Amino acid sequence: MKTELAPFFESMAEQDRCAVVICNLRHEILYMNPAAKKNYEKWGGGHLLGKSLLDCHNARSKEQIQKVVCWFAEDKEHNRIYTSHNEKQNKDIYMVALRDEAGTLIGYYEKHEYRNAETGKRYDFW
């Protein structure tokens, strides 16, 4: 059943207007959705795939990322943490744990959530 859902989850991430960056426990960037590639374009965009997320951060941020991953690993209930707010873009940024079927930590992702109210009309197809 899970493999049947994989294309749905991939499509869901691809369509998200917010940046989604998925990393393994070695901090390698495994996936960036189109919004993430665009958001991080001046730092390499899609060329960041396969590179270390830690290379994109200063020493303090690297330390915080490591602490969060350790916290995720401590308990299966430790799954989401607020990391920052981007005032200019009015969005919150979170780190979210990724776990396998047994609940073992296998990676994490960065999720951006905008606070702006939708400006489009309801069900406006065009």
Image: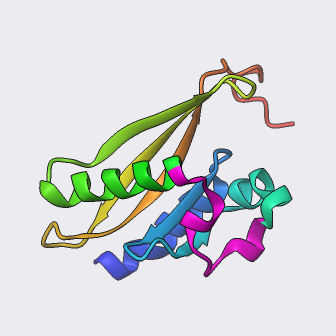
Left or right of residue 11, residue 101 in this image? left
The residue positioned 16% from the left and 66% from the top of the image is: 103
Tell me which corner region of the image, top left, top right, bottom left or bottom right, holds residue 73: bottom left
Name the residue located 54 percent from the left edge and 54 percent from the top edge: 59
Residue 29, by quadrant, is: bottom right
**Residue 39 in the image, given as x and y percentages of width and height:** 76, 50
Residue shown at 27% from the left, 49% from the top:
79
Q: Which residues are magenta?
A: 45-59
Looking at the image, residue 120 lies above or below residue 102: above
Q: Quadrant of the N terminus?
A: bottom left
- Examine the residues drawn in magenta and state their main secondary structure: helix
Q: Is residue 41 magenta?
A: no
Colour basis: rainbow
**Looking at the image, is 121 positioned above or below residue 27?**
above
- Could you tell me which residue is drawn at 57 percent across and 73 percent down? 52
Q: Position of residue 12 (x, y in %)?
A: 55, 58
Q: Left or right of 69: which side holds 14?
A: right
Q: What is the x, y in percent for residue 126?
A: 87, 36
Question: Total marks drawn?
Answer: 0
